[in-house]
Each structure stands twice: as C-alpha cells, then as structure tokens.
Image: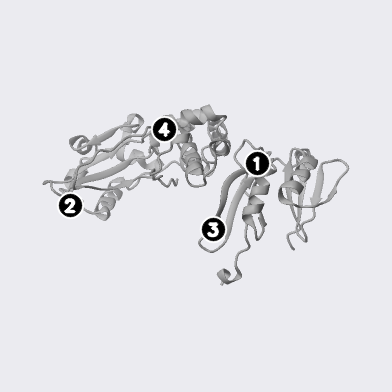
Amino acid sequence: MKLGYTIIYVADVPNTVAFYESAFGLKCKFVHESNLYAEMETGDTVLAFAGNDAAEMNGLAILPNHPESPAAGWEICFVTDDVSAAFKLSIAKGCTPVSKPSEKPWGQTVSYVRDLNGCIVEISSPVASASLG
Amino acid sequence: MPDGRCDIILRYNTYGSGSPIPVITGPATQPYTVGYDAGDSWLGMRLRPGKGVTLWQQRITSAANTVLRGEDALELLPWLAELKGRYSTLNILAAALEAKTTGHFTDHRLSLALDILHTSGGRIRIEKLATYVGCTSRHLNRIFRSNTGLSAKTYAQLLQFHRTLKLIQHEHLSIADAAFEGGYADHAHLSRAFQCFGGFTPSSVPRDLSLPTLFS
C-alpha cells in the first residue's frame, strides 16, 4: 500500500484550484465536469480537492473548513528553496499569514499561512539531509 | 499578564528577617502590577489550570483576581505553617503540596476540554466544546468554575488573547492579520480584549513584555 491521494473537502472546487495555481504555483491536472472533484499536478502523491457535497454523497460526516473557524488538525507542506518569496506570493494572492518565515534550530526555514478555505499550509525549505543523521 | 492560573509563591527579602511570606493567587483575568523592594526574591509554582481547586478548595469559585498574603494564605493552607520556614526550596514546597493534594482527581471532561481549548487557541465555541466532551455547556461551565475558578468562556478568551498577542509580538503579524487569525470579529473586538486582559491597545503592546507559556 502507498499514499496515493491527499483530498481536501472544500466549498468551491474550481475556485480552490485557481487559488492553488496562483498562490502556490501548482498546475491543475483535471477538474471533473461536476465541479465536485479536481486533481493537481503534484507527482506520485496527488493533491486533490473534493466538494463538501461530495463528502455527504460518500456518506462522510465532516466539519467543513472555513477561513473564520479554527483550522482542522492537519496541514499541507510545500517545500521550496526560497521560502520568503513563496510566503510573500501566497499572501499577495490571498492567503492569510499565521507565522512568517523563521529558521528552526535544525536549519529548516518554516512559515505557515492559511488558504482561502482556512486550511493550514506550511511553506518550508527542505530539511538538510545532514540533519537527518 | 493574567493567564487564569493559580500560584503559590513564597516571598523573601535578603535584608529582612523572619520566615518567607506565603502568597496564594487566584486565577487572574486582569493585568496587575507587583511591587517589590530591594532584596526581594520569590519562588513559587504556577498550577495547571484544572488544579487551582487544590489550593483554594471550595473558595475557588470566588478566587478570581484574589490574592491572599501572609496570615490570610496560612488560613487557607494551614499546612504551610507546619513547614515552619523549611519550605525554602521549590522541591520541598512541591513535595508538601503534592502530599496535601494527593487523591485530587481532575474530571476527565475538564482535562479534555482544556486540551481542546488550548489546541484551538480558545477559538472554539463553548456549546461545541461541550458536545465534544459529552455534557451540556451549563455543566461544563460548572466543572470549569469549580476547578479553575473561571467560566469556560473566560478561560477561552484568555487563551485567545495570549495567542493573538503572540502572533503580534513573536510572529510580527499586522494587527488586522493577527485579529483575523486569532478569531476576533474585528479591530474593535480585538481592542476590547487587549484592553481588558492586557491593559494596553493592540498598537501599544509593551516591548519588554514577557509572555507566559501556556500549556494545559
């Protein structure tokens, strides 16, 4: 078994896809004609968005993400060599800041924003392989 | 800065004589200033939020923003007098406190509610919190008041204030961004909370403020 998909339930799938394209520079792989499901080009592990309605159709009960509610207890982490630029771009494109880029004792630069749906997105530098021992 | 916790403190003066003066504080919800003289020193413990009742017992419900000093503190905790000045180190004080409070059982619903409140930065509604821990909000409030001395809502507001203050002071967020992430409806809401709990406006946070670390 391997991790295949991370699927975030959102209020508006096309809007979220457009947001992730502009704020994080991702590319859209496809959007289902129902507008209730979309996948992004993220390699082997697919980042996908599904409509909150799809959760109900699948028999799931969820607490919908909302920008004015506390974030759900998980996050997405994007890794980049230029955290500062990526952080600034995300804010310029509509993310709200939580934690500005700061260097951690293990040498990683880490920042946090919340996306249009209130989900936590971490933007950080790669962990230096030496620090992994 | 008020953090809703109870303390037990021993106050010494290097130049003074006699036993240290015991001080017991109730959960604070307002900022306060502690005066001191040359040679003063303190040692003490800050209790976890649900443990305030072990100091104050039934009086916890009216202990908010109350400080007992000297004889008043000894009246509340007569066992402090039994130590007869031997309580000169934290270890001795901690051991004595532990011995006197053994058997105190924190309601698991309170522990769970405190964990959820801390994790959510005080942003969760009390009605929802009550459903998570499996009781009514009225009952949850009763558990909060009888253990922490504060209502669940007041405790949540303190957490929300401290997290938002940290976003401004440590993360250098703008006041508007911090208000949003902290869960305040608008600038006026944030300002009221800062004035109430901190005694300052969001734009005039004292530079030398040292923030307490809050763990449940």
Residue under the point 51% across and 43% down? B167
Residue that mark 3 sits on:
A103
From this viewpoint, which residue is outermost toward the right? A33
Question: Mark 4 belongs to which subunit?
Answer: B
The answer to the question of whether label 4 and label 2 lie on touching residues, with beta carbons closer than 8 A, is no
Task: Using the image as rendered, state which of residue B68 and residue B128 is in the foreground.
Answer: B68
| Mark 1, other Cα within 10 Å: few <14 / some 14–19 / many ≥20 | many
| Mark 3, other Cα within 10 Å: few <14 / some 14–19 / many ≥20 | few
| Mark 4, other Cα within 10 Å: few <14 / some 14–19 / many ≥20 | some
With B152 as the anchor, is B19 left or right in this view? left
Percent coordinates x, y for residue B117 in the rendering: 51, 40
Considering the numbered disc 1 on the image, is that residue within a helix, a strand or a loop?
Answer: loop
Residue that mark 4 sits on:
B200
- Could you confirm whether marks 3 and 4 are on the same chain? no
Task: Using the image as rendered, state which of residue A107 and residue B72 is in the foreground.
Answer: A107
- Give the residue type at disc 1: Gly
Percent coordinates x, y for residue B16 in the rendering: 12, 46
Task: Using the image as rendered, state which of residue A7 and residue A131 is in the foreground.
Answer: A131
- Give the residue type at disc 4: Phe
- Give the residue type at disc 2: Arg
Considering the numbered disc 3 on the image, is that residue within a helix, a strand or a loop?
Answer: strand
Q: CA distance from mark 2 to mark 1?
A: 54 Å
Q: CA distance from mark 3 to mark 4?
A: 30 Å
Q: CA distance from mark 3 to mark 1?
A: 24 Å
**Viewer-nearest of labels 4 and 1?**
4
With B149 as the anchor, is B85 left or right in this view? left
**Viewer-nearest of labels 2 and 1?**
1
Kindly identify which numbered label has been placed on residue A118.
1
